[in-house]
Image: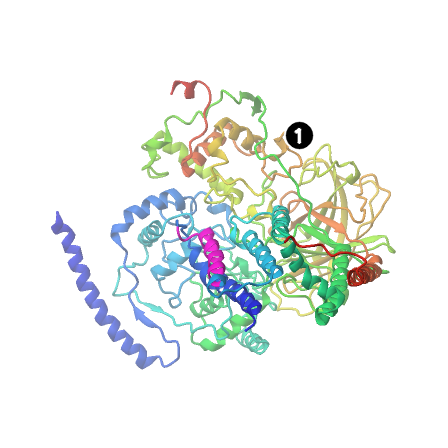
Amino acid sequence: MNFRLLKPKHMEMTMTNNNYIKRLILSFLAVALIAVPGAALAGAPDAIKTDLVEKGKKVYFKRCVWCHGVEGGGDGPSADRLFTRPRNFIQGTFKIRTTDSGELPMEADLIKTVKNGLPGSAMPAWGEFLSEDEIVAVVNFVKTKVQDRDFNDTEDEEVNVQDFGTNPWGTTGPYHLGVPQADIDAGKEIFMKNKCFECHGGEGRGDGNPTMKDDWGFPIVAADWQQCWNFRGSRRNHYDPFNVVRTISTGLNGTPMPNFKDQIKVEDRWKIAAFVNSLCPRKNIDKLTNKPVPDFLIQSVYTEGNVVAKIDDPSWASPDTDSRIVALSEELAENPLKHYIAMAGQITRGKRNFDPKTDNLWVSSRWSSEENAVYYLVEYHQRFMSQDPEFPDAVAIQWPAQLQELFGAEKPYFIFGDSKKPVDVWKASYMAKDYNATNAPNEKGYQLETSVKETVARGFDAIEDKESEGKVEIVDSIFHQGRVKVMFKRSLTTEGEFDVQIPSEQFIPVAFFQWSGRDKEHDEHMAISTWYYTILKPALPASLYYMPPIIAAIFICFQGWLVWMTKRTRKMYDEGKMRRDELPK
Amino acid sequence: MNKTLVSFLVFVVGLAVFHNAIFPIFTPKEVGWILNRYVYFLSFVFYLIITHFILRLKPPISMMGLFVWCIGFYFYKFVLYPPIPWTLFITYMVMWSIGTFLYISQDPETFREFRKPIVKAIVGEYKLAQIVLMIALPILVGWATYQSIYPSFQEPVELRTVHPAPPATTKVHGKTYPLESTNNPFRIDEQDNYKDSFPFLDADKHEYMKYVTEGGTIFFQNCHYCHGDQLNGLGMFSHVFNPTPANFIDPGTIAMLQEAFLFWRVSKGGPGLPNESTPWSSAMPPWEEHLKTEEIWKVILFEYWYTGWHPRTFGTEGSEG
C-alpha cells in the first residue's frame, strides 16, 4: 500500500528539483533583463495539496456551492440574483493577487480572500467561521476546479510575486491619516497623466465608462474610490493604501482593470494610492458588516433668518468624513453634518430589487423658524444617470402622514405604511439635461430637470396622489461627477390632512427610497432604508451665555463665605472664645 | 528627600509602570489562575504596601486617603471585567468614597490631620493652593454649567420583544396550521445521520439531502441578503435594518424554537407580528407571498441542517424519549 504513496512523492521531489533549477535560471534572467526596481521573483504556482482536496470538497459542498456552483462555474443557485456575480473558477481567473497580471494567484492570496471575504459583494469573511485547516483545504479544492489552467503545471505556468515596496509614510490603521498633501497632489497628477478617470471618473466615483464587460461578458463597473469599504481587495483594512498599490500593480484579472507595473514606478503607485485613499471619507466602519455605521439621527440645524437654497453655498459645506475622526474646521463647525443612510434593495413585495445600484445616501438638513420651512439635502453616488424619460432617476423621503396620532415609538410599516398608519411620500424625479453616459467627465456637472410628486400611502397597493399637495419644492439639484444632489424644501406646517406636520425639538421618523432609472427601476422596484429619526434642533438658548458666569459668580461668593467662616472660627479659637475639639489622652 | 514626595512618586510611577507594562502580561487571551487581572490588582496593592513598609514612608493621612480613593477608581474603571455601566460605576464609587471617608475619620487625630492642609489652603497659609483653588473651581463650575445647558440630542432608545408569543394557529395559503402540533413534513429522518452527506452530491442518494439542497437553493435566492451566507445575520443588506436580521448560529434563535414557530415567522414576516411586539420595524417580508408552503418548510429544514441545531420539540415526541 505504501508503495503507491511513495511513487508520487518521489515524482514530486524531482519536480521540485526541476523547479528549483528553472527558478534559478529565471531569477538570473529577471535580474539581467528587468532592471526596474520592484522586480518580481519568478516561480511556479503553488501545487495542489492533493491530500487536502477531499476535506476541502466537504467544506465546499457545505458552504460554497450555493454561490460558486457544483462545478465551480460561478453559477450556484444565488448567482443570477447577485451583482457582481460569484467567481467562476473554471478559467483560473482571480482578481485579488500579488502575482503579475494574467497569472495564477498564490495560495496565500486565495487564503486571504477566503479569510477576509470580498467587501461590497456577497462573499463574506470566513476567517472566523471556518478553521485554518478548513480554509487551506477548501482553497486547494477550489484549485482543482480550475480547468483551463493547471496549478501543477510547472512548464507553462509561471508566477511572479511582485514587490510592492513599503508604505513610505508609515501610516497606520484604522484610518491611515497623515499622508503629506504634496504626495496626494502628486498622486492626482499621475492619475490624470495615466487617464484613470476614463473608467473611474473625474472624482473617482467610478462614473467613467458605462459599457464595460468582464471576461465572461457580464456588465461590470469601475470601483468607487469614495466608498473604499466596498473595495473587494481591502482585506477588511479599508483605508490601507496598500490595497490600491496592489491593485494598480497587478491589475484585476478578468476585468478591464489593467496593471500599471511597467508604466508607473512603484513610488508613484504609492502616491496614486495616497490620492485614491484621500478621497474615501473616514467613517466608523462596523467590523462585522464592513460598512459604515448608519447615523440614525438626522439633525436639522437651526438657521437665523432664511436658509440659502443653494447646494454650493458655504452654509451647506460639510465634509463626508466623520467629525469625530477628523475635527471640523472653524468655518464648518456650525454647518449641518452629512448623515450616512444605509440602503438595501426592496425584496418584500412585487418586483423585487436584489441588486440595488446605490447602497447609501447622505443627508444634511437646515430649518428656519422665520421662514417656517425645513430643507433636506439628499446626496448619493450614482455612476450613470438614466437617459430614458420613461424611467427617470428618483429619490423620495417618507414620513408618517399623521405624526400626532402615533403613540410612543409606534411607526407605520417602513415601506409605504399600512392600513392604519398612512405615510406621506415626497418623491423627486429627475433627468439630467444634455447628458450622455459616455460623455467625458464634466467638471461643471449637469443641471437636473426635476418634478415632485406627493403621495399618501397605506400599503404597497394603496398609494394615492394627494388631493391637496403640501407644496414640497426641489429648490436646487445637480448631477456632478457621479453624484446626485437634490435639495427638498417644505413648510413646517400645511393645510393637507395627510401632510406631515413637522414640529421642532421632536424625534420624527423618516425613511428614504431611491430609484436608478438606468436599471429601469420604478414603483416598488427600488432601494429602501429603514426608519431613521430626524430632529429640528432648537436655536442655542440665550441662557447658554449668561448662566455659566452667574453660577460661577455664585460659587465665588460661596468660596468667599467659606474663607470668612474658617478665618472667623480660627480667630475665635485664638481668642479663647471657643474650645478646640480635644484629642483623647 | 521629602518622604511625602517619595511616597507620591512610588504611587504615580508605580501605577504607570504597572498599568502599561505589567497589566498586558496579566491579561493574556487565555486567562489562568495566576495570569488574571485580579491577581494583577492585588499585586499592585501589595507592591504599594511593601514599598511603603521598606522605605518607612508615612505620608500624611490626606494623601493616604487620596491613594485609597484612586485605587478604588482604578479598580472599577480599568480592572473589573466585564466593564460595568456608568450608573453602576457611580454607585460603586459613591460607596467607595464613603469608605474612604470612614478610613480618614477613623479617629479625631487622623481626621484633624486630614483637615489641616484643607484649612490651610482656605485661610491662605498655602498661598499658591488658595489662589489656584479660588480661580480654577469657579471656572470648572461655569464650564460644567455650559456643558449641561448646551442642547445635545441622542437617538431615542427603543425596546422590543425578541421572541413574541406565537398565535395558536396560522393560516398559510388557505390552510390552517395549529402551531403546537405541526411538524416539518420534510424532516423524514434525524439530521445527525447526514453529517457526511452533502447537498447536490448526495441529493440523489438520500431524500433528506434532496430536501436540504432544495431548501438551500431557496435560501440562497431569497434569504441570504439579510441572514447572510453563513446564516449569522450578516448578509449584504443586514447593516441597513434596525433591528438587525436574526443570527441563526446564535443559540438564542432557532436552536430554542420549534419549527412551527419558524414556519409562522417566515410565512407572516414583520407585518404578521402581534401588536405587543410594537414598536417594531422588522424588515422580514411575509414569505408566503413569494414561496410555496413546501418551500418554506424546506428552507427551515436547511437552516437547521446548515447550523447543526436541532429544533425544539414538545409533547409526544419529547415525553416518549
The residue located at (64%, 45%) in the rendering is: A530
- Say which residue label 1 marks: B275
* B119 horizontally vs B102: left or right: right
Q: Quadrant of residue A38?
A: bottom left
- Range covered by the magenta-colored residues: B34-51
Question: Up-down: is A71 above or below A362?
Answer: above
Rendered residue at 86%/60% (across/down): A305
Quadrant occupied by the C terminus of chain A: bottom right
Q: Is A61 displayed left or right of A234 in the figure?
A: left
**Residue B191 in picture, x, y percent from top left:** 37, 31
Establish if A28 lies above or below A340.
below
Chain letter, disc 1 residue: B
Local packing at callout 1 (Cα closer than 10 Å; few below 14, some 14-19, many 20+) is: few
The location of residue B115, given as percent across then percent down, is 68, 59
**In the image as oriented, which residue stretches furthest toward the front?**
A585
Q: How many numbered marks, from 0 up? A: 1
Q: Picture coordinates of residue A504 (x, y %)? A: 80, 49
Relative to B180, residue A581 above or below: below
Prevailing secondary structure of the magenta residues: helix
Question: Which of the 4 image quadrants contains residue A545?
Answer: bottom right
Q: Position of residue B144 (x, y in %)?
A: 74, 58
Q: Amino acid at mark 1?
A: Asn
- Can you say whether A185 is above or below B284 in the image? below
Looking at the rendered structure, the secondary structure element under dot 1 is helix
Residue A186 seen in the figure: yes
Q: Is residue A214 visible?
A: no
- Which residue is at the front of the view, A44 or A131? A131
The quadrant where residue B172 appears: top right
Colour approach in the figure:
rainbow
